[in-house]
Image (cartoon, rainbow, N blue to C red):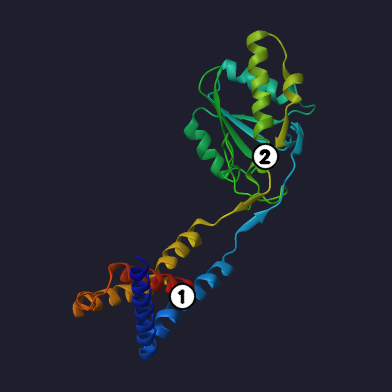
Amino acid sequence: LKTALVFVWRQTRALLFKNCLVKCRTKKSSVQEVLFPLFFLFWLILMSMMHPHKKYGEVPNTDLGTLDTSLLVNLIVGYTPPTTMTREIMKKVAFDNFEDGIITEEYLSEEELQEASAFKPSNFVGVVFNDAMSYQLRFPDSVTMSSLYMESRASCSSLVKGCESVTYWHSGFTALQACIDAAIIQLKTNRSVWEQLELTRAVVMGEAEVMEIDSFPRAIILIYLVIAFSPFGYYLASHIVAEKERKLKEFMKILGLHDTAFWYVSIWYNLIILEKM
């Protein structure tokens, strides 16, 4: 057994020496085998540096305060259809919560309301009643009408501008909605709930420290990573094919080569190339 191990070690050493000689004699391909992956890897690192991940610190909760009905003072509120119930609702909205009232206008249909809004100033809003209990608000396009906000931290970095949830709260949409709801409830139950609704508060929820990853550069980098290491696969396949064509393994086995020595050398050789890369 000891003699066999010594024999395998000698063959392994001889094969390694043979591979080193081949690499020294084919300097051009050897240099390309190492430099190509390094070249692609350099550009990969450069791309990563050009598109760094965005890191955002921890943000505490921000209190936006209670409903601000003063936002509705300068609004012109158009509503449709002009029924007895809707007139009562809008009358309460206009005069119960404001000293001087707010301007309300009647329209016979929703189409007429939409046509009128095209010629009205930007402070014109519409209310379309489906029935005595449900309605829809028509605000300018600058106010996003959504009950759910899932914004990127980048688009809401400042609560003063650029944050949809804050724009939504300060647009008067919620205040007008609360006024109409309070009027409907009072007419239906003969009980005022405005004092409770007026205390409604809005809070922008804080966030923990996060790192936002841009998906597009990340996908490009993953594709480029495959390209960067493709030369290694090319040269490895070339060596295997050349060895198969020349039948070097079969020839060396005739001369007494052990399979163990051959596979040891193949594994070590590939590991050395990977370490260089």
What kind of element bears circle 2?
A: loop
**Residue 200 vertical position relative to residue 45 in the rendered view, above or below:** above
Residue 112's place in the image compared with 272, above or below, is above
Question: Taking 173 as reference, is 258 left or right?
Answer: left
Residue furthest to the top in view is 190
Count how many numbered circles sit on residues in the image: 2
* Residue found at x 57% / y 38%: 145
Gap in angstroms between the C-alphas marked 2 and 1? 52 Å
Could you tell me which residue is drawn at 72 percent across and 16 percent down? Answer: 193
Q: Quadrant of residue 87?
A: top right
| Identity, as a three-letter code, of the amino acid under mark 1 | Phe
Report the mark closest to the observer, 2 or 1: 1
Which of the labelled discs sits on residue 40, or is there none?
1
- Residue 133 in the figure: left or right of residue 14: right
- Where in the figure is residue 36, as x and y percent of width and height? 43, 79
> Which residue is outermost to the right?
99
Left or right placement of residue 268 versus residue 48 in this view: left
Q: Residues within 10 Å of mark 2 (few under 14, many from 20)?
A: many
Residue sitting at x 80%, y 26% = 99
| Neighbour tally class for label 1: few under 14, some 14-19, many 20 plus, Cα within 10 Å | some
Q: 108 and 149: which one is in front? A: 149
Q: Is residue 183 left or right of residue 255?
A: right
What kind of element bears circle 1?
helix
Residue 155 pos. (x, y %): 62, 51
Kind of residue indicated by mark 2: Ser
Quadrant in which residue 138 is drawn: top right
Residue wearing tag 2: 171
Q: Position of residue 103 (x, y in %)?
A: 68, 32
Q: Residue furthest front?
A: 2
- Is residue 266 among what the camera can see? no
Identify the mark nearer the N-term, 2 or 1. 1
Seen from the viewer's position, the closer of residues 145 and 101 is 145
